[in-house]
Image: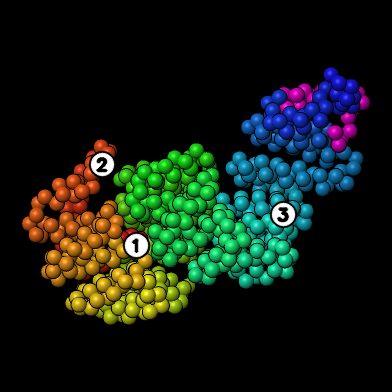
Amino acid sequence: MSASGTSHAAADGAVSLHTLKDLIDERLFASAVTLASFAVSEKRKPEPSIHFQVKLRELFATALVGNGEPLRAVAVLQDAVKQLSASKKASEQLSRINKLHTRIVSILAENNRLDDALDQAKRISATMRSAGLLATLAEIYHKKGNRQQAIDCYKQVCYKQPYAIQAPLALLSYGYSPSSLIEHYRANLDEDHAWIVTFLQALGSYYESKHKVSLSLLDDLLQRFPDNEYVLRFVGECIVEQTDMNGALEVFEKLSSLHPFFVDGMDTYASLLKFVSNRSGLNRLAMRLQGITTHRAEVWLAVAMYLDLVGQTQRALGFAEKALAIDGQHRPAHLVRGMLLYDMDNVDEGIKAFRAAYLLRKDFQSFQGLIDGKIQSGKILEALAVANHAQQVFPENAQALTLLGSVLSHYQDGKEKASKMLEKALEIDPTYTPAAIYLGAVYSVNNQVEKAIEVMKGHLEVARLHKAPLLTQLASVYQESGNSSEALLYYNRALAEEPTFKPAEEGLKKLQRELGSGNFDEQQQQETGHEEDEEEEYDEEEEEDDDEEDDEEDEAEDSFPSFDELG
């Protein structure tokens, strides 16, 4: 041993603090734990100082956490607290005691012992709580579903540490008013950090469903921060909300390529891959995410969507619920669970799932899911109440007006009001395809076939890239009016646009049967090629169900597309 090493041992006893720090820095945690245990249990005369004993236990705890022994680390830190509290100068050590308590809270929270963490936090007075502790408490309250308490903690973080950007981002996701946050950050950030205000403005606009404004601000940020993962993620999210699925897919593909270990928003990317039926791409994404972490809800949602895409709905539901077990406040997990429950004809539980998503954030997906469930269960009046509320939350908005028009269309005497709502939606946003589809359906049911065809054909010229639902509805109107040749043309155009679009496949099967052609399935197999054995078995099981659904459609008086079909 060197001379310096000998002097350290003499001063520090069996093991020097310096040695323990070196072992921890080199991530030799098992060695640090073993040596620290000897140092703590050593009998020495005279006894080392309180400062030394506490510092030794702090290092011991750090090594234990690194070695995967968090509860043992908590016990060591609690021992350090006892030693400081029993010292003659305990009042002077209050700040250090609070830091130890904060460390204990953090370890307990990281290991999902939330109630124990909250109990430990009570030992720290409100005035002595650091921004870090408040952020940890906010995350705990979020996981427990105590929304208001989480908001209160995040607000305090904003005032204690303006650069703790996780706090304002969380507040905005809760629906907190952006204006007061923006004002605070403008007053507390220097010019070099003014871009943070722009980022907060962009996200505030996104959460208020002002997607065009948000996109403009995000584009400004991309000029200074090209290819930043957080900016790209929200660019993609905004484009999804504008129903340009192909455009959003391009953004998320770029994001995933540039930042392959970035998990935020990857459940949205998974939903886009499912939307275009990219089975292999979704499988690769789900596998890659599992290789990054198994402790994020986004990972298991991607798995759930892959399983749903290959027809394993029951298993998909299990993984959606696994995502919620990790983060019960993850809104997309509630949305996916709700859709899966609807697919399994468990409408009541599906409505509960969409209501949980709605309580987390009032957005169109939540409203849409609630309305679809109410309509499926025959509660049209309740669906109308939800649609009216959506319009109040989002006045003069094409999506909200379309939701309301879609519900009114289910009333025999509501068709005229529905058409007015849908016409107004198209005036506000001429590119909003769901409004054109519903308007065409309303005109068709009112025997205004030519008007229905005119609206939908005209919309084809301005529609965004995802045109399969519009082409399918147009084919359906032609089919119902007896124009089989035009119906055949537009069903084929829909399938050329999106080869696996199920409503177009089902409509074309029905048309082929009406025309007396029995070889449609064989033709489709020749066009699409052979699928894997697993999928072929699934398709055979679904064949009888498809026939039953077609029979039900024949018996229905009024036929309107569901929002699931519209994307």
In the image, the segment drawn in magenta is: 32-52
Secondary element under disc 1, as helix, strand or loop, is: loop
Q: Which mark is residue 531?
A: 2
Q: Which mark is residue 71?
A: none
In terms of depth relative to the viewer, which is nearer, 343 or 478?
478
At 24% across and 61% down in the image, what residue appears?
493
Q: Residue 478 occupies which quadrant of the picture?
A: bottom left
Q: Is residue 354 left or right of residue 84?
A: left
Q: Residue 441 occupies which quadrant of the picture?
A: bottom left
Tag in front: 2 or 3: 2
Considering every residue shown, the one lying at the far left of the view is 516
Q: Amino acid at mark 2?
A: Glu
Give percent across and percent down for residue 496: 26, 57
Distance, label 2 to label 3, CA atoms, is: 55 Å
In terms of depth relative to the viewer, which is nearer, 272 or 168?
272
**Pointers 1 and 3 in contact (C-beta within 8 Å):** no
Q: Is residue 204 visible?
A: no
Q: Residue 1 occupies which quadrant of the picture?
A: top right
Secondary element under disc 3, as helix, strand or loop, is: helix
At 20% across and 69% down in the image, what residue appears?
477
Distance, label 1 to label 2, CA atoms, is: 25 Å
| Crowding near the residue tagged with mark 3, few <14, some 14–19, many ≥20 C-alpha atoms within 10 Å | many
Q: Amino acid at mark 1?
A: His
Q: Which mark is residue 466?
A: 1
**Pointers 1 and 2 in contact (C-beta within 8 Å):** no
| Crowding near the residue tagged with mark 2, few <14, some 14–19, many ≥20 C-alpha atoms within 10 Å | few
Q: Is residue 446 left or right of residue 252?
A: left
Q: Which residue is mark 3?
A: 131
Give percent across and percent down for residue 543: 19, 48
